[in-house]
Image: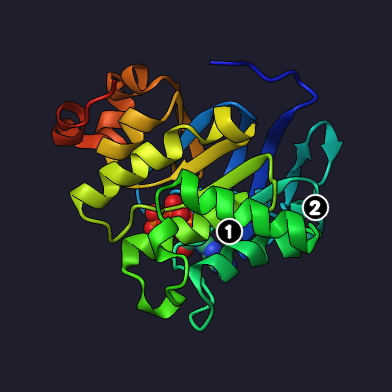
Amino acid sequence: MLTSSNSERLTATGVVMDFAGLRALDNVSLSLGRHEIVGLIGPNGSGKTTLVNVLSGALTPTAGTVSIDAENVTGFVPRKISRAGLVRTFQTVRLFGTLSVFENVQLGAFGAGIRRAQATKKANDLLELFGIDHLRDVLGDSLSYGQKRIVEILRAIATDCNYLLLDEPAAGLNEEESDKLLGQLSDIPEQFGCGILIIDHDMNLIMRLCQRLHVLNQGKTIAEGTPKQVRANPTVVEAYLGSQGATDATEP
Ligand SMILES: Nc1ncnc2c1ncn2[C@@H]1O[C@H](COP(=O)(O)OP(=O)(O)OP(=O)(O)O)[C@@H](O)[C@H]1O
C-alpha cells in the first residue's frame, strides 16, 4: 500500500455535531489518504452518516475541523468541498433515470468542469475498466439496483476526485453483487489516486475491502485499526459485531 503525505489527506479533527440537545458526534477524529480504503462502521444511529455529512459539507460541525490536503474546509458548502476533491454517494441512489449510463458518467465529469472531449474519453474508459461497456446506452431507470450503484460510483470517479465517500453502497445488493462490487472498488485507490471512506453494514465486504476501520458507537470512536484488530476488540464485538459477525466475516 502506498502512503500519502500529510498534505494529501482528508482529515477530521475533534468533530462535534449537536442536533438540538442530541450529541450525534463527540470529538471524532479520522483521516483518509489517497491510496487507502477505510471503513466507517457502527450500529444504527452511531453517527456514521452524520460524519459523512460533516466531511462533505452538508453539515457544519458544532466544533472541530475538516481539512482536505491541509486546507481547512470546515463549513464549506458541498460544491466547494467537491471542488477541493471530495465527492460522496448517498444511501439512496441518485441517477438521472432518463439519461443513459454513458451520459450519467459523462455528466459527472462535466459537473467537475472537465471539457467535452476529455469527459467523453473518461466516461468511455471508466465503463470499459469496470466491465459495464455493454450497458453504455441503457437508461438509468432500466438498470438493476446493483448496476445503478456502480454507475453512481463511476459518475463520482469521473469528477477526478481524490476522496470518495460511499454511504452504504452494498445496501440492497445480493451476495454475488456485493462480491462484484468488492472487486470493482478495491483497485480504485491505486488506479485513480482516490481514497475511499466506506460506510456499510455488510461486514463480509468491509472486512475484505478495507485496510483500516474506524468504529463509532453513540457518536464516539470506540476503536480504530485493521479489520483483524477491530474484529478481535471486545468493545466492538459487544457494541456492534456480535459473536456472529466477529467470526463470519473474513479478510484476505
Ligand atoms: N438532521 C438531524 N436532526 C436531528 N437528529 C439527527 C439528524 N441527523 C441525524 N440525527 C441523529 O443523529 C444520530 C446519528 O445518526 P446517523 O444517521 O448519523 O447514524 P448512522 O450511524 O449513520 O445510522 P444508520 O446506520 O442507521 O444509517 C441519530 O440519533 C440520529 O437520529
Residue sitting at x 44%, y 48%: 46
User: In this rendering, is residue 86 above or below 19?
Assistant: above
Secondary structure under tag 1 reads helix
Does the image show residue 235? yes
Seen from this angle, which residue lies furthest bottom? Answer: 98
Q: State the CA–CA distance, disc 2 to disc 1.
A: 15 Å
**Which amino acid, mark 1?**
Arg
- Drawn side of residue 60 relative to residue 215, left or right: right
Residue 3 quadrant: top right
Residue 11 is situated, as x and y percent measured from the top left of the image, at 70, 33
Does the image show residue 88? no
Residue sitting at x 74%, y 45%: 85
Work out which quarter of the rendered image holds the C terminus and state it: top left
Q: Which residue is mark 2?
A: 83
- Drawn side of residue 71 relative to residue 208, left or right: right
- Drawn side of residue 146 relative to residue 148, left or right: left
Seen from this angle, which residue lies furthest right? Answer: 71
Residue sitting at x 58%, y 62%: 105
Q: Is mark 1 within 8 Å of ligand 1?
A: no
Tags 2 and 1 in contact by the CB under 8 Å rule?
no
Q: Quick one: label 2, few (<14), some, or many (20+) residues within 10 Å? A: some
Camera-side residue: 92 or 118? 118
Residue 155: mark in rendering? 1
Residue 138 is situated, as x and y percent measured from the top left of the image, at 42, 73
Camera-side residue: 180 or 227? 180
Q: Is mark 2 within 8 Å of ligand 1?
A: no
Residue sitting at x 38%, y 31%: 209
Residue 227 is situated, as x and y percent measured from the top left of the image, at 36, 23
Residue 221: mark in rendering? none
Which of the colour schemes (rainbow, by chain, secondary structure, one colour) is used?
A: rainbow
